[in-house]
Amino acid sequence: MEGNAMLSRREWMQRTGVSLLLVAALPAVEARRGRGEAEDDADDRRGRGGGRRGRIRREVRLNPTALGRATRTRGKARIEARPDREREKFQVEVESRGLAVGTPLRVFVLNPAAGPDPVAAADLVLTPNPRRPVELRAELELESESAALPAGVSPVTGITEIRVIRSDTGELLLTSARP
């Protein structure tokens, strides 16, 4: 081989012993994890689940709008599904340092798998956060194990957007869409 000649992929694999499947699979796994889409759980890694039948998790940061920034409001959502066990979970956490105790909130989801229009998933009320006295908090947890999820929320893996509004004024505070 000449001094500056580049190795072909095949020659490089033969010399290093690296498998083409491994080289091709790593970028796809990292890209999937980087977007926060599907994540295999521990059972899948031990060989008891498997790919699509295993747990699907996604954590989504809720971005504050101008009003959300002004009221120092932040939030996040978690979506979890176990298709092999027909279990779904949808959680939303909202924290604020600028809204009043008792402020009513409403969580909307956009789920094209269930219909074209946003659906009200639940109403929440801000209460004092026991861990941080200067902060208010509201939390939503919907699980298919304890009760049926509201129409339009299921399947949770189909949720494409989450919005949190002040239900007394209708103003948007947080959204999963890019600002």
Image (cartoon, rainbow, N blue to C red):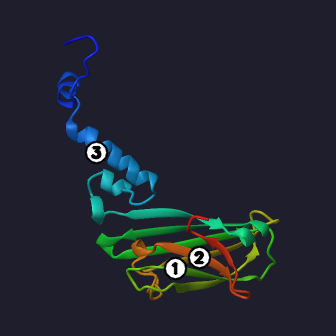
Label 2 – label 3 distance at C-alpha = 35 Å
- Give left or right: position of 158 versus 122: left
Amino acid carrying mark 2 in the image = Arg
Quarter of the picture containing the N terminus is: top left
Badge 2 density bin: few <14, some 14–19, many ≥20, Cα 10 Å: many
Residue name at image x 59 percent, y 76 percent: 163
The answer to whether residue 49 is visible is no
* Tag of residue 109: 1
Question: Which x, y percent locates residue 122?
Answer: 58, 85
Q: Nearer the viewer, residue 88 or 6?
A: 6
Q: Earlier in the sequence, mark 3 or mark 1?
A: 3
- Give left or right: position of 154 versus 132: left
User: Callout 1: helix, strand or loop?
Assistant: strand
Question: Which x, y percent locates residue 138?
Answer: 67, 75
What residue is shown with label 3? 25
Label 2 – label 1 distance at C-alpha = 6 Å
Number of residue marks: 3
Badge 1 density bin: few <14, some 14–19, many ≥20, Cα 10 Å: many
Residue name at image x 43 percent, y 80 percent: 144
Quarter location, residue 35: bottom left
User: Callout 3: helix, strand or loop?
Assistant: helix
Q: Earlier in the sequence, mark 2 or mark 3?
A: 3
Label 3 – label 1 distance at C-alpha = 33 Å
Q: Nearer the viewer, residue 26 or 57?
A: 26
* Tag of residue 163: 2
Badge 3 density bin: few <14, some 14–19, many ≥20, Cα 10 Å: few
The answer to whether residue 83 is visible is yes
